[in-house]
Image: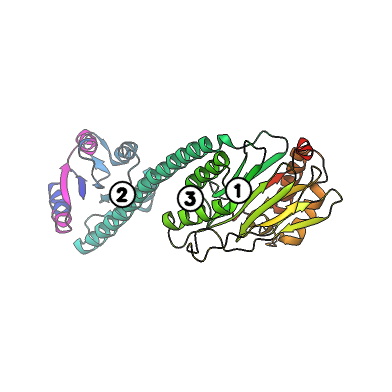
Amino acid sequence: MKLLCVDSEPIYREIVSMCANNHGLDVKTATTFQEAIDLFEEWEPDLVTLDILVKGGSGLSLIKELKLRTNGRFVPMIFLSSQSSDSTMEKCFNAGADDFLPKPFQEALFNTRIESHKRQVMLVQEMSQKNRELVYYKAMIEREHKMAHQVLDHVLIRCENTDHNVAVTRLSAASFNGDLALVNSRSDGARLIFVGDFTGHGLSASIGALPVAQAFFDAVDDHIEISKLASHINRMLISILPDYMFCAAYIVLIKPGGRLFFWGGGMPKAYIRRQDGTLDYLQSMHMPLGILGPSEFDSTLGEFNITAEDTLVIATDGVSELKNEAGEMLGAESLETLVSTCYANTNLTQAQEDLKSRLSEYQGHSEQIDDITFVAIRKRVSENKR
């Protein structure tokens, strides 16, 4: 650490230098106004002592010039002066001084002040370094999130997001949504759906999204049975995810004739809203993907029949656990009411927006603590004829 002493009196330059050296400081001295400015710019000291009387100018003007040249650094400046009236000290502090010691001063007092300012400088420098590191890591995280978004968006291009019989809403709790919603149709007209909720939220929760998406689209292309798809994804996630991570999910296949098959693990119940407003429930009877080994994994499927007037609605637990400003969760019962009400609209896009709007109204200004995803599917009208 470096100290610049600006003083026209040799005795005080010597005293300050000796005391500062005893505290491990490198010292340079200046006797004139311009010399002090030149040394300050060239050497960039961490501490400055100066007198009110300076050759070629005044200490009050000098401190203002030095403060302008700190380039954002914290540099304590201490006046050492024989002029010690209250009005003089007030002028010094108003000019930018951080401390004032009247001459002659006791070395013990000077040492205490120097040590105090030295600790302060070290603390500020440490905080500045940590702040620079935080800015760097923030920029790195933002870049990684952007890259992850681009990669995942490229994968999701194959999803049927423009079909008027498909509506997908994903609301992130962080900058990256860890939920996964995939919808695509096979060449035989059957529609495959995957809705997954990885442990946690944000980027860390999405690390399994790419391999799961690849397995999903392979199943679409190869007409793989969803029981086999569930087993495959389960084995894959066990091999790539850390022990504390898993994926609650629904895998659904809707055949052209209206037969619906599903596998559910670790998810809240999903809904089939019938034309008359009543609800049938898809129960998630199994453990989430990525927990049980192949010998324990259960790939048993559930079945339903649906018509073109029915709506399949799958929501991650972030929906029912959404809190309002009073800290109250929405809950499964209220969600069921919203599903029954909103999806009465024959326009699926409008129905989805209605549900989204009502969830936002319920949430108010409260913080969203988990990723939210809800998917609504209606069977194509033409499928009834197949």
Instruction: Using the image, tell me which numbered label, if any, was put on residue 208.
Output: 3
Mark 2 or 3, closer to the camera: 3
Residue 366 lies, in percent from the top left, at 65, 54
Residue 252 lies, in percent from the top left, at 65, 50
Q: Decide: few, some or many residues near mark 2? Use Cα within 10 Å; few <14, some 14-19, many ≥20.
A: many
**Labels 2 and 3: the sequence-earlier one:** 2
- Quadrant hosting residue 242: bottom left
Q: CA distance from mark 2 to mark 3?
A: 52 Å
Position of 4 relative to 282 (above/below): above
Instruction: Using the image, tell me which numbered label, if any, was put on residue 194.
Output: 1
Task: Say which amino acid is labelled 2.
Answer: Pro
Q: CA distance from mark 1 to mark 3?
A: 13 Å
Is residue 19 part of the magenta span, yes or no?
A: yes
Q: How is the image coloured?
A: rainbow
Residue lying furthest right: 276
Image quadrant holding the C terminus, namely: top right
Residue 125 lies, in percent from the top left, at 31, 50
Residue 43 lies, in percent from the top left, at 20, 39
Mark 2 or 1, closer to the camera: 1
Task: Say which amino acid is labelled 1.
Answer: Phe
Q: Which residues are magenta?
A: 18-41
SS class, disc 2:
loop
Nearest to the observer: residue 157 or residue 73: 157
Nearest to the observer: residue 10 or residue 257: 257
The residue drawn where x is 26% and y is 55% is 118
Q: Decide: few, some or many residues near mark 1? Use Cα within 10 Å; few <14, some 14-19, many ≥20.
A: many
The residue drawn where x is 62% and y is 58% is 264
Report the residue marked by disc 2: 76
